[in-house]
Image (tube, helix red, strand yellow):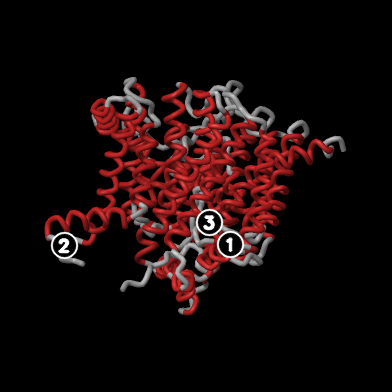
Amino acid sequence: MRWIKEIGPVAGAIILALAVGAIVTALTGYSVPQVFKYLAIGAFGGRYQLAQTLTQATPILFTSLSFLIAFRAGLFNIGAEGQLYLGAFFAAWAGFTFNLPPVIHPVVCLLFGAIAGAVWGFIPGWLRAKRGANEFVTTMMLSYVAINLTSWLVAPGGPFHGTQWANQTVRVLTSAQFPRFLRGAQLSWGIVVGVLIAFVVWYLLFRTPRGYELRAVGQNPLAAEYGGINVPRNLILALTLAGALAGLGGAAEILGTHRRFIELFSPGYGWDGIAGGLIARAHPLGAILAAVLMGALRAGGQAIDRAGVAPADLAAVIQGLVILFVVAPELIRYFQRLVRREKLGDIES
Amino acid sequence: MEILSLNLFIAALRLATPIALVALGETYSERAGVINVGVEGMALAGALTTAVVAYFTGQPWLALIAAIGVGALLGALHAIWSVYLRADHVVSGAAINLLVLGFALFLTRVIWGWRGTSPSAPTMDAWILVGVGLSLIGLSQVYIFRTPWGLRLRVVGEHPRAADTAGINVYRTRLVYTALNGALCGLAGAFLFNNLGRFTDGMVGGRGFIGIAAMVVGNYRPLPALLAAYLFGFVDALQMRLQDYIPSQFSLMLPYVLTVIVLAGFLGKAQVPKALGKPYIKEQG
């Protein structure tokens, strides 16, 4: 029953966030029942809606894993957005440059994406381990560099400007594309890859000596060092893996959803990963649920906008509130204590 | 080189101001022991508040005060989360950044119908705010190192148990200085709005994080942090002029690349407050 203990406060935080979200909705003059109705329908109302939720959840799952693997080692990867862009670009490049058989081709593209992301994670990891540079600043700064760099690659005058009317590359070959599940929906094999990777990350973190070392460094670097663990190496490894995971997310997004690299294609999946990783309480399998929640908020948000009920960004406000309440477990415990006190009478103190 | 003119150095001072204000704010809160990564969001909130109030009232001064107030409230929120509820400091700050960005996108749609941008609104001369910023930085250098209040602030960040024993309220001190950090970020946001004349959701663009870097390089001291901020402002001003010569994407990278290089080259010289980021739990009874 340990998982109920873990999920309880998160569920409490989500309910609290939805309640405050309802207040914000009412204060800004929108209809609360309408907003929540279309939010729910848009996210879970049918197979296409569900497909849309999972499509949005796919990149967020990868970036959530990216955030949490670094977090487990005591590091903050705020720069998943840039790693995602680099991974996306290099996966697209491998997708339209090589001519490979199906199955092998997307795997090669994923590898390119992972390596590109890994390089972008390695740099801040190395700078943190060897030079003491704050990784939450450097990952963020490098994120801006990556976004600008990929924008230039596909801009007019850049080397991979593929079409006249937009800043994007040419399409990746059919052999590189992820098959889709439903006609007319973008949901692809990316989500399956994401769930598999989540299990891999879980296994790595909780069932291997390497993962044990990573977590030991995160919990107490001094004790870990005293216990003979090479702390700098683990810091570098954690951010490199974090970069690789975000890069994989970008690759999956290209192979499954866009099929080409498009400038500024991400609506903030990297930032959503911070939210997803925190909501998952840094657990890789919890990240699957957290990513679905984030995906549902994005899909539901689009639905309330289409229905003319409220702007889609109301969902972003609710998302922000969820994170705010999730990260303060003491707040939920405070409410739990209040409830318990009412039940038991004030016998604790 | 016609790029290197007097104008460049003047523009650099202007562009350094928001970075220097964030660095000053972060100096206060980190000296008290609170890491605040939410500066990015707090500055964005300040800019948005300035835009909304200036748009509806036409009073730039009122807008400035409102921005400082909203910044202080967000700073207080971060303090409640990290000091009283003992949330991880970086996590709480990141949450505030995401929350503010969500609100900014939502409110611009609600108010003006445009996602993430505002129409132009009445501004004040941004040079006034440059002057205000410089005065605050000078005063703070004296306040932190030459007054009893500054001493109390530093003790809270270095040795909260000793501060507590000496009768200083550790929690309240951290709350006050984190709120002050938020207020200074609000001021930085107000500057950004008055500098541009309108609001956009990307207008802070990492300057909050660059401000933190300036503080680290300035070794938690207001005046050296100002010098570091000036360096960043200079590169920001330079990159705008370089756009005529190299693709804009590359010139836009310069401030970010510089930040990484400066942080990397600054090997462990900073004297980090000893209790930074650690929750203080008051002994019971």
Assess whether mark 1 and mark 3 are in contact (beta carbons under 8 angstroms): no
Residue shown at 39% from the left, 53% from the top: B81
CA gap, disc 3 and disc 1: 12 Å
Task: Name the subunit of mark 2.
Answer: A
Where is mark 3, residue-wise? B29
Crowd around label 3: few <14 · some 14–19 · many ≥20 (10 Å): many
Q: Dot 3: what SS?
A: helix
Q: Quadrant of residue A94?
A: top right
In this image, A87 relative to B225: left or right? left
x and y percentages locating residue B240 in the rendered image: 72, 35
Residue shown at 45% from the left, 72% from the top: B161
Q: Amino acid at mark 1?
A: Gly
Where is mark 1, residue-wise? B150
User: In the rendered image, which quarter contains the N terminus of chain A?
Assistant: bottom left
Where is mark 2, residue-wise? A346
In this image, A182 relative to B250: left or right? left
Q: Is residue A20 above or below residue B151?
A: above
Foreground of the two, A249 or A330: A330
Residue shown at 45% from the left, 21% from the top: B113
Q: Amino acid at mark 2?
A: Asp
Q: Is residue B143 visible?
A: yes
Q: Amino acid at mark 3?
A: Ser
Q: Is residue A196 visible?
A: no
Give whichever of discs 3 and 1 has the lower sequence position.
3
Q: Dot 1: what SS?
A: helix
Q: Is residue A319 above or below residue B84?
A: above
